[in-house]
Amino acid sequence: MQASHVSVQEVKAPVLIRIDHVGIACRDLDEKVAFYESLFDLTVTSREVNEEQGVREAMLHVADAPGGSSWIQLIEPLAAGTPVGRFLARRGEGIHHIGYGVTDITQALASIGASGVRLLDQRPRHGSMGASIAFVHPADLGGVLTELVETAVD
Ligand code: CO
């Protein structure tokens, strides 16, 4: 009888599993929400104030995907001196960051950090709708502020 052999292969799991959201900085959240709702027929699923990040935000649901949903995140700074407030003063309204879905944020941070790319968050913190999030330095990613998102398990 022949023994069955399971070949152990180094299967590299993808770090990013989908685009979770596009973060868009705006000066007037309510006005921008109304505009996005009417133009794209989208619905706000969640509104939050994140004191730690200094923003008021709304998540507009775009679509469902196998790994989770995708969103537009509209963000308004709570004050001019916050990171998003400074972003608006410097660059004006527009795309602020891209949020990518990951399966395991701790693993993703370790893997990206090991490559030498600078992490703005060494460990995950609280994001929208109970997600665990972490930011990666834009200067090491071609000017794109990049957020990793591990969706909350419901
Ligand atoms: Co975000």
Image (cartoon, grey):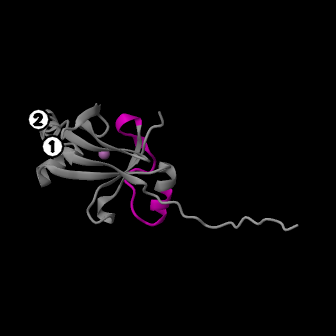
Q: Viewer-proximal residue, 32 or 118?
A: 32
Q: Please indicate, yes or no, whether residue 48 appears anywhere in the rendered image.
A: no
Residue 112 location, x and y as percent?
Answer: 45, 61
Chain part drawn in magenta: 110-130
Q: Position of residue 151 (x, y in %)?
A: 43, 42
* Residue 31: image location, x then y, percent: 11, 35
As drawn, 145 above or below 154: below
Residue 26 bears which disc, if any?
1
The residue under label 2 is 31
Q: Quadrant of ligand 1?
A: top left
First in residue order: circle 2 vs circle 1: 1
Instruction: Give the camera-side residue of 60 and 133.
Output: 60
The residue under the point 17% across, 44% down is: 85
Q: Amino acid at mark 2?
A: Glu
Q: Residue at x 15, y 43 (%)?
A: 26
Labels 2 & 1 near each other (Cβ < 8 A)? yes
Relative side of 6 to 43, left or right = right
Q: Is residue 126 magenta?
A: yes
